[in-house]
Amino acid sequence: MSKIQEIATLVENGKVKLIEAAVKEAVDAGEDPSAILNDGMIAAMGVVGGKFQANEIFVPEMLVAAKTMKKGVEVLKPYLAGDSVGKNGKYIIGTVAGDLHDIGKNLVALMIESAGFEVIDLGVDVPADKFVEAVKANPDAKLVGASALLTTTMDSLANTVKVLIDAGVKSQVKIMVGGAPVTQEFADSIGADAYTPDAGAAAVKAVELIA
């Protein structure tokens, strides 16, 4: 098994304690740092996302895999050309006003980061205009992710999308929405560019949207 395959397996299996040494070893052995990132860790998270969608693994396993990758990336950062960690641009994410849930949002943020984006996390209970401000402050941001985890905050999600569209940011960013009560139909009805049912799908969709 090559060093890169070994790293991929460690990420897939969430071996947080072993990843740093394995990444260092691979770099010392002359493996290309961006290959370690893309073919090793990002590819592994793609597999993890697929398993999650197929219900073969669940949120805890996915979180551990993402955490493993994060540790591996920390080791790699000094060796990577400055831009490859955020090579896909910036992704602004937040839970909408009135909603204090952050586990789903954090999971999406981790997966989006592992797909090569620099994540700007606005936190929870984020007013619509704060999303707009963040987009304007980051002209290189390409995507906005907004989540609502309660049926009562779906209106707030609709309002967030409306305020973003009214602010004229649609020429710059695409808007992704998600959360337990959100459906494709609802996303279409409020004018969002994409809806994804889970964090793994969000990462895949994000890369598709900027292609």
Image (spheres, rainbow, N blue to C red):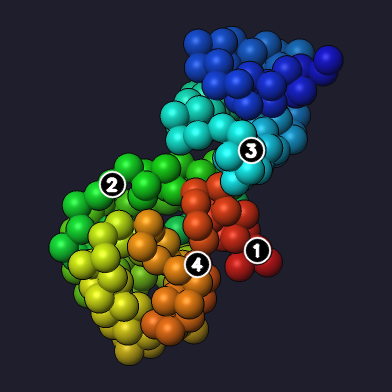
Q: Looking at numbered disc 1 in the image, what kind of residue is underneath it?
A: Glu
Is 25 situated left or right of 178 in this image?
right
Q: Which residue is mark 4?
A: 195
Is 210 situated left or right of 32 in this image?
left
Q: Looking at numbered disc 4 in the image, what kind of residue is underneath it?
A: Tyr
Within the image, what quadrant is residue 39 found in? top right
* Camera sees residue 192: no
* Alpha carbon distance from label 4 to label 1: 13 Å
Q: Looking at numbered disc 3 in the image, what kind of residue is underneath it?
A: Lys
Within the image, what quadrant is residue 20 found in? top right
Query: CB of mark 4 within 8 Å of CB of mark 1?
Result: no
Label 2 residue SS: loop
* Alpha carbon distance from label 2 to label 1: 25 Å
Q: Residues within 10 Å of mark 4 (few under 14, many from 20)?
A: many
User: Which label is found at residue 113?
Assistant: none
Q: Residues within 10 Å of mark 2 (few under 14, many from 20)?
A: some
Is 40 situated left or right of 130 in this image?
right
Q: In what quadrant of the picture does the C terminus appear?
A: bottom right
User: Which label is found at residue 51?
Assistant: 3
Label 1 residue SS: helix
Q: Looking at numbered disc 2 in the image, what kind of residue is underneath it?
A: Asp
Foreground mark, 4 or 1?
4
* Alpha carbon distance from label 2 to label 3: 22 Å
Within the image, what quadrant is residue 168 found in? bottom left
* Alpha carbon distance from label 3 to label 4: 19 Å
* Camera sees residue 191: yes
Name which residue lies at 63% across and 43% down.
54
User: Which label is found at residue 102?
Assistant: 2
